[in-house]
Amino acid sequence: MDFVRPWLAIGKYRDTKDLALLRAEGVSAMLLLARDVQHEGIRSRYLDVDDGVELPLALLAQGVYFVSAARRRRDTVLVACGAGISRATTYTVASLCMIEGISIKRALLDVKRQRPIAMPHVKLWRSLCEFLGEDIPYRTLYGWFEELPDPRYKT
């Protein structure tokens, strides 16, 4: 689990099962994109999202709405998919853009700085761009990533 903001983390399915970790990190809400996991005292919303396929915009909106509502409640939110690479990145970027009003580039680079393995699948990227009203070719991401420091030296 990696924190992108003090209130927003991105992670993998295994993180969602580790109640001790969730409590230690102060997680009080989870957007689950791999499997449904329930813990007493932690709000959760499971969305059946497949990786590698275009995402219905209504499904993306449901996740962003959940994260936005959690933010308004001052919850600490974990967005998690199977490996914490593609689906979780897509929802985390969309949530940052909508909640903070930042650009898709800034949101993606903020996520990538904290979680170097973060990389939305090309079809999820297309869905994200459509959701946000952007038209950014996937290959553009590689140029953006060149702006980041080497992740082995993450501070």
Image (cartoon, rainbow, N blue to C red):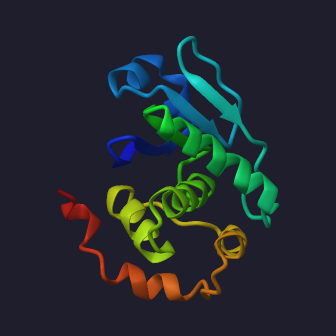
In this view, the residue in front, 122 or 67, is 67
Query: Residue 120: horizontal and vertical position, in percent?
Result: 59, 66
User: Eyeballing the image, is 152 above or below 130?
Assistant: above
> Is residue 80 visible to the viewer in this orientation of the structure?
no
In this view, the residue in front, 148 or 101, is 101
Quarter-wise, where is residue 80 in the image? top right
Q: Residue at x 42, y 44 (%)?
A: 8
In this view, the residue in front, 39 or 133, is 133
Q: Residue at x 22, y 59 (%)?
A: 154
Please tell me how many numbered marks the rendered image carries: 0
In this view, the residue in front, 110 or 35, is 110
Query: Residue 121: horizontal and vertical position, in percent?
Result: 64, 68
Query: Residue 110: horizontal and vertical position, in percent?
Result: 37, 64
User: Eyeballing the image, is 33 above or below 127?
Assistant: above
Q: Which residue reaches farthest top? A: 40
Q: Residue at x 45, y 76 (%)?
A: 105
User: Eyeballing the image, is 96 above or below 142?
Assistant: above
103 to the left or right of 135? left
Q: Which residue reaches farthest front? A: 72
47 to the left or right of 81? right
> Is residue 146 visible to the viewer in this orientation of the structure?
yes
Q: Which quadrant does the N terminus fall into? A: top left
User: Eyeballing the image, is 94 above or below 26?
Assistant: below
Q: Residue at x 18, y 63 (%)?
A: 153
Quarter-wise, where is residue 130 in the image? bottom right
Q: Which quadrant does the C terminus fall into? A: bottom left
Query: Residue 93: horizontal and vertical position, in percent?
Result: 52, 61
Quarter-wise, where is residue 22 in the image? top left
